[in-house]
Image (spheres, grey):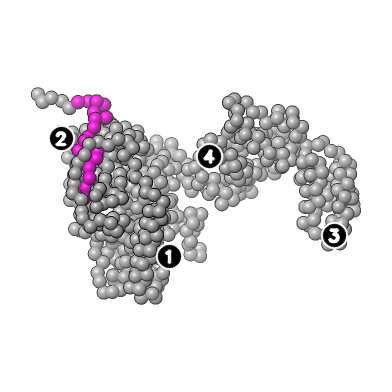
Amino acid sequence: MPRPLPRLRHVLALPIPNLQRTQFPRLRPAPFSQRFATTTNTTTTTASPAASSFLPATPDNSFQKTAKAQRKARKDAHEEKDQGKSGGDGVLWNGISGHAGRWEVVCGLEIHAQLNTGRKLFSDAKTSLNETPNSHVGLFDAALPGSQPIFQPQTLLPALRAAIALNCEIMPESRFDRKHYFYWDQPGGYQITQFYHPLAKDGYIKLFPTDGIELGEGVEEMVVGIKQVQMEQDTAKTITTPSLDPMTTPSTHLIDLNRVSHPLIEVITTPCLPSSTHASLALRKLQSLLRASNAAIVGMEWGGLRCDVNVSVRPRGSTTLGQRCEIKNLFSIKVVEEAVEAEARRQVSVLENGGVVVGETRGWDGELGKTFRLRGKEGEVDYRYMPEPDVPPVRVGRGVVEWLRREMPELPDDMLGRLAREVKAGGKYGLTLKDANTLMAWDGGARVGYFEEVVAKVRRHLEVAGEEEEVIKDAGRVVGNWVIHELPANLTSANLTWTQNPVTTTHLADIISHLLLGKISGRTSKSLLPYIITTSVSSSSSQSTIDIPTYITENSLLLLPLSSSDLINLIKKVINEFGDMYTQYRSKKLGGLRNWFVGKVVREGEGRVDARRVERVVGGVLDGEGKAE
């Protein structure tokens, strides 16, 4: 009987010397290196580096400034050259800079998102984001001879949540395929994916004006089709250190296998996006849906979501798609916009000059602002797909899908509608669309729960105090202003992030409740936030020991209990002190001057007189009627 393979936990931290530090020849001349190198370095292998050697060397400032200026000059030169080729009369439609008219662009997205799961797709090694390189590597991850893929069922749940969030039809049975291509970050020489029998298909997302899209008159939404959602394994991570002197020292490429077999989903849209702006908005919406559904919480800023874009152009009004070119590995929404526009201009230039667009895979050069050829496409299927013989079909029961539907977190469109629905229309919070979008966008939506908890506590305080129904209903708008404006401003002044926020929901609810009940002034309420933040940061005691009602009482911050006659006398005192302003008011009856007098009365009351109460009385006194409340 052959000797069994060692258990995986004993080999996770084994060094992989032939893969950890490898120097490879460039697959294409890099623009940065062309300024210095005239020869191609050959492949060599050295020992495993220290942790510090994974960081690129930092050039001095003069070198950085020179390189940046050279990159900008080269990019500007290429842009001028491209504009000259296009004839300058404009040929593209929908936001492609410098062009408009006879052609239109069509885009489709292929989004690769790392699933939110603790295990890899085909080994029980742990997933990692910033762990020590090559410290979470299974036998199959490194493609060691004799190792086989073992599907991890727990990776299926976030993929199913993503498919549900994208309104897809989940297939009762899906199968895996081998996608063959050789690259140094693919140890096995192929990737296991789902091409012929994906996990889900025929879905869609909707773009609304609240997403930033401009729609025609009478059009309320744009539907972006989802062709399919498929599971697949990720590749290794390549960390490149460019050589500062290629004549004597080769560039270094470090291979980190921690990312191999990290579970991915690939979301493929239909070719229906008519501009770079539409492509970026669709990508942003997809990212928000994947985060909200807890399927993929690591965004593009951390490399957890990458995008390939298929771009083609066609005569305006044509219904036939042009020859597409795929731009690989775009790492930000801004880069997606730039790459689509540059590739569209390139294809139009080819067609306008009598050429033919060739189907190929292209990369993006941010220095030049241009795409470049990586390899040609041999046909619609150019990876020699074949069924994966070592992984059985994945079968999903209907009960699992229904359970996941019931347990799905709230998705962005539903949350926006709930937060921004007007109170008079049955809404609970009554935020503006702008404020609701801001609240949802910050910290991945983490502030929404904080906001809702504060509103609930404020309303309980107001109900116990017997406050008017209108004041209770307005609590959502008032709390929104504090959470979106007042609190972040104070945290920024103290150099604190939202995760370091020492102001609990109880603290903020106590402050706002006292304000709405007329117990403290607006100026006093705003002074309490710096007190909480400063005390919590400087003191080692728990933030929960700060009691706002007690602090207000002990420091005599409650509003003066003035009678109606006392309030009128205070207003008259201010009028006598500023007689010239009173004369001006009586002659012109300016509303702005009335508000000016309100402010003066509040200040005369040492900041403890309720401004709303003063507003109700001051008009009558100014008009000589001396009316009480």
Q: Which mark is residue 95?
A: 1
Q: CA distance from mark 4 to mark 2?
A: 48 Å
**First along the sequence among labels 4 and 1:** 1
Read off the residue under disc 2: 145
Q: Determine crowd level at label 4: few under 14, some 14-19, many 20+ residues with C-alpha closer than 10 A.
A: few
Eyeballing the image, is 125 above or below 292?
Answer: above
- Which one is closest to the eye, mark 1 or mark 3? 3
Q: Amino acid at mark 3?
A: Gln
Q: Determine crowd level at label 3: few under 14, some 14-19, many 20+ residues with C-alpha closer than 10 A.
A: few
Q: Amino acid at mark 1?
A: Gly
Q: Kindly check if marks 3 and 2 are in contact, taking CB atoms under 8 A apart as contact.
A: no
Name the residue at 44% across, 42% down.
292
Total tally of numbered discs in the picture: 4
Name the residue at 22% across, 42% down.
22
Q: Is residue 134 left or right of residue 332?
A: left
Q: Which mark is residue 54?
A: none
**First along the sequence among labels 4 and 2:** 2
**First along the sequence among labels 3 and 2:** 2
